[in-house]
Amino acid sequence: MKSRGRFAPSPTGPLHLGNARTALLSWLAARAGGGGYVMRVEDLDGPRVRPGLELAILAELRWLGLSWDEGPDVGGPFAPYRQSARLPVYAAALGRLREAGLAYPCFCSRAEIAAVAQAPHGPADEGPRYPGTCRGLSAAEAARRAGSRQPAWRFRVPEGEVPFADGVHGPQRRDVSAETGDFVIARADGVPAYQLAVVVDDAAMGIAEVVRGDDLLSSTARQLLLYRALGAAAPRFAHVPLVTGEDGARLAKRHGALSLGELRERGADPRAVVGLLAALSGLAPAGSWLTPAELVAGFSLERIPRGPAVLRAREVEALFER
Ligand SMILES: [Zn+2]
């Protein structure tokens, strides 16, 4: 199977070296496997989307030497490639889940859920496990409540563990029902949750291999349940370790983690930046100058170290020394 892949940046903050590394690895996996590569802009987080940032991010990825066959700037057979333009697609998917009895309206406020929720907490991005308060509401009761409050929509999670094989981390299993409970797939204001949008898009766009940061490893089981519920074939997943600073903390400005835009402005050569990203991924010796294309031959995700990639401030400074 060809490894058609994608990168899905959010125009809510500048691209830093950690994001760029994930982009490079997802691109290499797709190209080494002979598959196409899709650029998709995830801009559903309206208030946080910064005007102009999408253009800057795409320009920086091109500067790095990456290319894509489909995307918001080049079009393609699965357009639109910007999530904010795909709301009818998500609404249709939600409609199918509702008709199948796999989604139900939830009228709880955050405070109400926190008040009745009990430990243990599931994945950090979901907050406390949803106790199922609205799971058994009758249609009449739901209709009555909808008169005074717009509901969110939750996915009816089946019991049991969800096993899957991760291309970097190996065999995984999670019990979504026990950890997260029925999770939100559409907010009360109608905006689809990340979990639903990403599954609908990857399925619609024929993505065969999702390579992304391992901060999303914990959401994969939830997404697999949605693939199953929507009758769509799930892609293979590979979660690459995050890049950290020398202190082990998630990459931040104080680690010299400049944005790609800043590196470019300060005169770094894109080949030196790609060399640094490759060195962080165990693909090239430190100090290499490379184009992404030069890394395609022989690339395999199995070569990526499973531990966090540590960015040293010294290595960032070295980008400006030749
Ligand atoms: Zn509820």
Image (cartoon, rainbow, N blue to C red):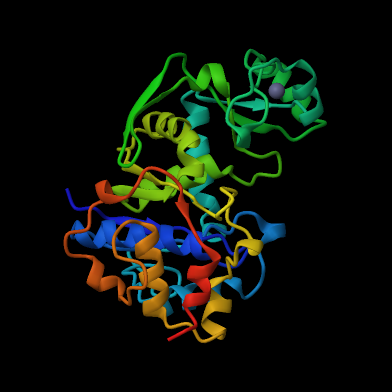
Q: Report whether residue 92 is seen.
A: no
Q: Residue at horizontal 62%, vertical 34%?
A: 124
Of residues 262 and 217, the one nearer the viewer is 262
Quadrant where ligand 1 appears: top right
Question: In the image, is 238 to the left or to the right of 246?
Answer: left
Q: Report whether residue 322 is seen.
A: yes
Of residues 207 and 140, the one nearer the viewer is 207
Residue 234 image point, x, y percent: 32, 38
Of residues 32 and 97, the one nearer the viewer is 32
Vertical arrangement, residue 217 with respect to residue 198, above or below: above
Q: Quadrant of residue 150?
A: top right
Q: Residue at horizontal 57%, vertical 70%?
A: 259
Question: In the image, is 146 to the left or to the right of 201?
Answer: right
Residue 193 image point, x, y percent: 59, 42
Q: Residue at horizontal 53%, vertical 22%?
A: 156
Of residues 185 and 38, the one nearer the viewer is 38
Residue 168 image point, x, y percent: 33, 42
Residue placed furthest toward the front:
314
Residue 136 image point, x, y percent: 63, 12
Q: Give the quarter of the figure containing the C terminus.
A: bottom left
